[in-house]
Image (tube, coloured by chain):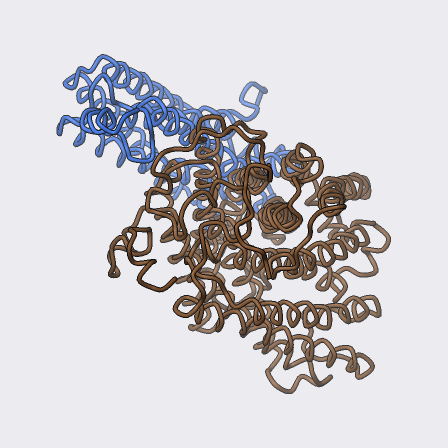
Chain colours: A brown, B blue
Amino acid sequence: MTTAVLQERTHYLNNGYGLKSWLLTKDHKRIAVLYFITISIFFALGGVFASLIRLELVTPAGDLVSSETYNKLFTMHGVIMVFFFLIPSVPATMGNFFLPMMIGARDLAFPKINLLSWYLLIAGGGFAIFAMMAGGVDTGWTFYTPYSTTYSNTYVIATALGIFIAGFSSILTGLNFIVTVHRMRAPGMTWFKMPLFVWANYATGVIQVLGTPVIAVTLVLVFCERVFHIGIFDPALGGDPVLFQHLFWFYSHPAVYIMVLPAMGVISELVSTFSRKPIFGYPFVAFSSVAIAVIGFLVWGHHLFVSGQSLYAGLVFSFLSYFVAIPSAIKVFNWTATLYKGSISYATPMLYAFGFIGLFTIGGLTGLFVAALGIDVHVTDTYFVIAHFHYVMVGGTVMAYLGGVHYWWPKMTGRMYPEGWAKLSALFIFVGFNLTFFPQFILGYLGMPRRYHAYPPEFQVLHVASTAGATVLAVGYILPAIYLAWSLRYGPVAGSNPWGATGLEWATPSPPPTHNFDRIPVVTHEAYDYTAVPQEVEVV
Amino acid sequence: MSSEAHAHAEETLALREQFDTAEQQKDASTLGMWIFLITEIMFFGGMFAAYTIYRSAYPTVFAVASSSLNVTIGAINTCVLLLSSFTMVMAVRAGQMGKRNMIIIFLILTLIFGCIFLGVKAYEWNEKYVEHHMPGQAAFHLEGTPLQGPAKIFFSLYFAMTGLHALHMVVGVGILLTLIVQTRAKKFSAEYFTPIDISGLYWHFVDVIWIFLFPLLYLIDRHLPK
């Protein structure tokens, strides 16, 4: 097939050209593409900050940047990656594109609000980037008071405002997903016929809606404290800085689940598709998403084990933190059980899925280490914690994100990516990631604190290993940027269902038409029913 | 629904293309507003949590600071707001019956009550400013307690909570103005008045927040003998 074939039919990409047709679009697929471009830029920016951090840490002395600059680097790395990449990552791109298609809808319930949410992310990102250009911010992405409210002389207000605005983008995405899943399902698409990706995004929506407003009001109070000199968290007035930490983590711990739940949804799709089996224990995997969303709200206190929180509160939070690991474990066990006797193919998305399962398991298990009161006192604010959450966020979410991008790329663009290059980059990422972050577990356990730009020479070998790994990882991230762009023009034309997958999104042509379905489908099969789908193409 | 029926519905009921039926569209909008209001509860909830913690930490200071607020004015303002909720209900009722003139009259009444509330609130804030009860003021001083720090915290919460509430009222006023213009442009009928309906939900929600704020801020330990 040639380019001419793709041009014959009207689809969402050639239905209108020009900037206006994109910037004023209400099509969830186009908005997903806008998000995709935006967060790719943020990811690159956050990656630049990470690279500078790793470069500084090659030598024990603080020689590349000053300590003030180093503080700004890790703060901006955290702010950009958490609020402008990880939070929107899977839901705003793949969720936006495929959630309506998977349930057989023409669009989300509120297309204009969907577009508004993208503009809010742009506006929030604008404030954050302004803060960085103007001189940066050095509070850490956690904005702990009273440093952030009273002492820091950097651009706290602009950054907080940026995060506040981007928060509303996240809230509106979640709201849109919840209403869409409740009200827009095609005839026959009952709750237990929905793909698990939809369940995961629904549960994420619940967290976005319940959690994000709390960080919004917390940032408003920090803002008011800096600007109007009111005193809510000011210890000089008898206020309590630990209250800030409670409010902050009431959102920011569930936010971890905002970042990882949709990624788990992607993995469910990948594991099923590439082993050609329904997900083992579907209802358990579906409910585990909801359980994570609910229990995830009850564990924030494990960030305050050394903040002067009462011992009894610590005990309860420690117990609940162990408890929230159960639904995550259910998912991992059920994915593994799905593989058993499956017809497994090793296409790139599946390599990422394998990567996710292994790395997320390490990230999750080390999460139990830090949820234990005794061990946490030893490793708090060390590289052990850094390694733990990078295993979850990068080893988990980013792996799933890339797996999903490769999996749905033929549907989004109508073209296949080059399989050989993709496998190579997946390998680079897996090796580079482990080389970067595994040494950090050891560093942290040996006592290397986070957020320091100089360190004792004994730690140098592990730091150099970590920086070397980061270099490999960077190559692994740059490769897809190149070959995916290449494939837009030169990739082989993909059929409507190159993987022989079961979701309704594969029942549309690639790329899909603007309103997804010429006729709204009537759903009769269970989710992941491979007897109903012919396998079109043998996967390489 | 056939495409012809869809086109017809689109003309009369402002049915958007992603929906199949007017009922589905109304359900989606209403659910969306309820979920938005849940986010608002969480938003105000952060401040209510802070209030709870500081009031239990400094009960006497909070009582003294609370007694410096003007209960009479606060109570009158509460009545004004309740009245505005009543007129909002009447506007929704008029919407159900498709009586455009009645919708406009009741929306304007709601608007007036809302503005009175904001005006009185501004007067109260000014009073606090004059009395040096504003936390940012260098001359801040509250009579009747040696603990000026916690007193500042009370007024910080007072201004933050009533300020954000007032901000929601201002947004509400904007919504009412939009609805009045839309009603005049004959956008609504007995078949389609969802925007009035869900704006009503928002207006009542903002009211309910005040119903919590009033006793929490104005009525602390008023029953105790001084």
Residue A239 in view in this figure: no
- Nearer to us in this view, A130 or B152: A130
Residue A156 in view in this figure: yes
Decide: is B29 above or below A212.
above
- Locate residue A130 relative to residue B106 in the image: left or right: right
Decide: is A62 above or below A532.
below
- Image point 55% across, 56% down: which residue? A86
- Nearer to us in this view, A341 or B218: A341
* Residue sitting at the far right: A374
- Nearer to us in this view, B65 or A34: A34
Q: Position of residue B58 (x, y in %)?
A: 63, 37
Instruction: Give the quadrant of residue A192.
Output: top right
- Locate residue B170 relative to residue B53 in the image: left or right: left
Q: Position of residue A532 (x, y in %)?
A: 55, 37
- Locate residue A323 relative to residue A345 in the image: left or right: right
- Nearer to us in this view, A419 or B98: A419
| Quadrant of the rendering where the N terminus of chain A is positioned | bottom left
Q: Position of residue B144 (x, y in %)?
A: 55, 36
* Residue sitting at the far top: B97
Please give the count of numbered marks on the rendered protein.
Answer: 0
Instruction: Give the quadrant of residue A185.
Output: top left
Instruction: Give the quadrant of residue A319.
Output: top right
| Quadrant of the rendering where the C terminus of chain A is positioned | bottom right
Decide: is A189 above or below A468.
above
Q: Position of residue A337 (x, y in %)?
A: 76, 43
- Image point 67% across, 83% down: which residue? A62
- Locate residue B216 relative to residue A107 in the image: left or right: right
